[in-house]
Amino acid sequence: MAATQRLELRQRQSLVMTPQLQQAIKLLQLSNLELAAEVDREIEQNPLLEREDGGNDTLLEPPAVDQQEAALDPATEPGLDTAFTAAETPSDGAAPDSGAVDHDSGLGEIVAADEGGDSLDRANAEQLPERGDDPLDTDYENVFTHGASWESGGEEAAFSNRGLGSARGDDHDFSLEQRLSDEVSLRQHLSDQLLLEIADPVERAIGAALIDLLDDNGYLPEDLGGLAELLGCPDAIIEETLQKVQRFEPSGIFARSLAECLALQLKERDRYDPAMQALVENLELLAKGDLARLKKLCGVDQEDLADMIGEIKALDPRPALTFDGSVAQPVIPDVLLRPDRKGGWVVELNAETLPRVLVNTDYYAHITTQVRSKKEREYLSERLQSANWLVKALHQRATTILKVSTEIVRQQDAFFQKGVEHMKPLTLRDIASAIEMHESTVSRVTSNKYIATPRGTFELKYFFTASIAGADGTAHSAEAVRHRIKLLIDGESRKKILSDDTIVELLRKDGVDIARRTVAKYREAMRIPSSVQRRREKSASVNQS
């Protein structure tokens, strides 16, 4: 068949991801911290973007009242007697005038003293010697007196002015914050002890290698044979160096197992006797709660064993955590929920997490008058379009978050009113169909977004739970069922430990049709031990008391 050319007209549908759409999707799934970093990057790259309030600039404000309106009429929603409103997020006030004078701060006295005719600069120039030529009888206590009055005049005012100038000028690089010592890391702390305690260069090299092998808990690998091969030294020298560095602070560091870590701390306290050694070497029996066997191995009675277990619990199984501890960052909610005085809930955006971005149109109008080439005009036009798209995308993101959050609150009204046991099963599709959005959009909005409620701060994903069928045909939330399981286990007595089968029977009496493997899965997810382990732990606690 011969190849020929021909014209064809075809019609098809395709999804085109424009750069603006990609940016909007990207901003939608960012957390508030990631969003702040992204906005900072855009402001750094775009000269037309700013954060401050301006005159004729286009400022990104939170959605207006008509855009944030989320009121629900109970008459139109059967079964709901709660109205939801979204209040307007308060905007920041205008910045104070930079030329205003605060007369209460003492600046008015400076101006008044200068109105007499002779300026302070001229007075200081006449009364003060050159720097470095202070007379021997200079009152240095007066020099560093910041509270001297300007109205007193003479040398007192001059010296006071000079003391303030010295504090602002020469010592500004040595503030109190810069004089504070930095936080010492674990490796630095151990390296300092290594230099003080060990003088032999070979042992120092081995000690430095051991420091590098420590994990986050302060443990070494159980097998150090590879280190001897790497350093090219006998195992005896490594073992000798290890015994020396194991005496470093914090106590228990450089251990190769939990038993060795506890043993090092007990040796430092001079409590590592044969009975305690037997207890440390059989920690698995202590974990199982087999106290009868432990008493036999340690050769002690019930009272002594209880005291020994108390000493073990007082030790630190992770000595390295006292250093290099990561500071827990508080969660900043994106949405705020509060009860309305008229009944219902008020859903509003957190103004602190909304980036206030503006397009500086005044600067754009000024710079366009100085543009000379076509390339410069294209650049400014592209920057202006990019800035406008960013402002629009941020506004759309805020509006979408508010809309999704409002619908979640409406769907989970029973949770906010009565507690977690009344949480309803909810899926992304339920919210998406209610607000007429795609499920992927709802998924992006609820990721890494938090809402502050009277019952605590929750991630928006928390309210989406699976459905468990009930005996009467009603559906139960998986989170509510987990809460019931926890309440049942917390309320069990020492003489009657609830097994998974017993929990299944109790839940079925309450109308929850659940399998035993589901109960076990939920229990393990909440880190609750099995009934056998709970019975041993409660027996051990009673014996110790």
Image (cartoon, rainbow, N blue to C red):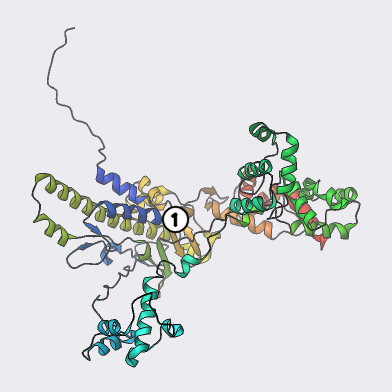
Displayed quadrant of residue 110: bottom left
Task: Find residue 475 and report its horizontal and vertical position in percent.
Answer: 52, 51
Q: Quadrant of the C terminus?
A: bottom right
Q: Is residue 175 above or below residue 262?
A: below
| Residue nearest the observer in this picture, 315 or 99 | 99
Between 543 and 462, the residue placed more toward the observer is 543
Three-letter amino acid code at the position of disc 1: Leu
Tell whether 339 sits left or right of 296.
Answer: left
Label 1 sits on a secondary structure element that is helix
Quadrant of the image containing the N terminus:
top left
Residue at point 26% right, 81% down?
A: 121
Residue 359 appears at what percent x and percent y? 21, 59
**Residue 511, can we see it?**
no
* Quadrant assignment, res 323: bottom right
Q: Is residue 189 left or right of residue 90?
A: right
Picture layout, residue 386 above or below residue 171: above
Q: Residues within 10 Å of mark 1 (few under 14, many from 20)?
A: many
Q: Residue at x 41, y 70 (%)?
A: 171
> Is 373 placed left or right of 91 in the picture?
left
Report the number of discs. 1
Q: Residue visible at 66% across and 44% down?
A: 204
Q: Position of residue 100 (x, y in %)?
A: 25, 80
> Which residue is located at x 38 percent, y 74 percent?
132
Above or below: residue 102 compared with residue 261: below
175 shown above or below 423? below
Front-lying residue, 351 or 357: 357
For the question of whether residue 199 can be seen, the reply is: yes
Where residue 531 sits in the image (x, y, percent)?
Answer: 73, 50
- Say which residue label 1 marks: 460
